[in-house]
Amino acid sequence: MPVKPFQIKMEPQAHERLKKRAKQLGVTIGEMIQNLLASFELRMKDAHKILEANDRIDVSGMDSIEVDTALMKLLLTKDQRDLTGKEFEEEQIRVLSSLRKDEWKPEVKFGDMSDYKPYFTKE
C-alpha cells in the first residue's frame, strides 16, 4: 500500500515532543503516530477483554460505536488521572451502565386472585 503524506494540526510543544520521541526510536513521525495508534488499539482490545470477563458489565444490546467511544474516553481518562486497574474497572461500570438503553420495562400484573391459597398460614 502506498504511503500518503498527511498534515495533522497539533500544539507546537506536542509536535516537538513527538519528533524527539520518534528520533529516539529511530522512526519517522508518521511511523511513531502509527505505532501510538497500534498501541492504543491493543489497549482497546484489552479493555474489551475486561468487559467480556466481567459479569458486572453487560454491553449486549448496546451500540458498539457508543461502547468503543466510551472505552476510548475511559482509556485516555485512565492515563490522565493515573487510575489503578480496580478504579478503571469501576469507572467502566459507571460509564457503560449509563449507556444502557433497555427497552423492556418490568411490570407486575396480578391475575384473578379469587382461588389463591397462601402457602404459609398463621397457626
Image (cartoon, helix red, strand yellow):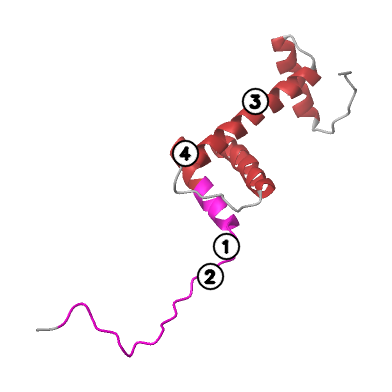
The residue drawn where x is 55% and y is 39% is: 81
Q: Earlier in the sequence, mark 3 or mark 4?
A: 3
Q: Mark 2 points at which residue?
A: 105
Please state which of the two labelled residues, at mark 3 or mark 1, is closer to the viewer.
Answer: 1
Q: Could you tell whether 37 is left or right of 54 in the image?
A: right
Left or right: 2 as drawn, with respect to 31: right
Q: Residue flagged by tag 2: what amino acid is it?
A: Lys
Which tag is nearer the camera, tag 3 or tag 4? 4
Dot 1 or dot 4: first in sequence order is 4
At label 1, the amino acid type is Asp
Magenta extent: 92-121
Q: Badges 1 and 2: C-beta atoms under 8 Å apart?
A: yes
Instruction: Name the spot of residue 61 as percent of width and height, x first.
Output: 60, 53
Look at mark 3 in the image and give the residue it sits on. Answer: 39
Q: What secondary structure is marked by label 3? A: helix
Report which residue position mark 1 lands on. 102
Label annotation for residue 53: 4
| Dot 4 amino acid type | Ala
Identify which residue is drawn at 75% across, 28% down. Answer: 14
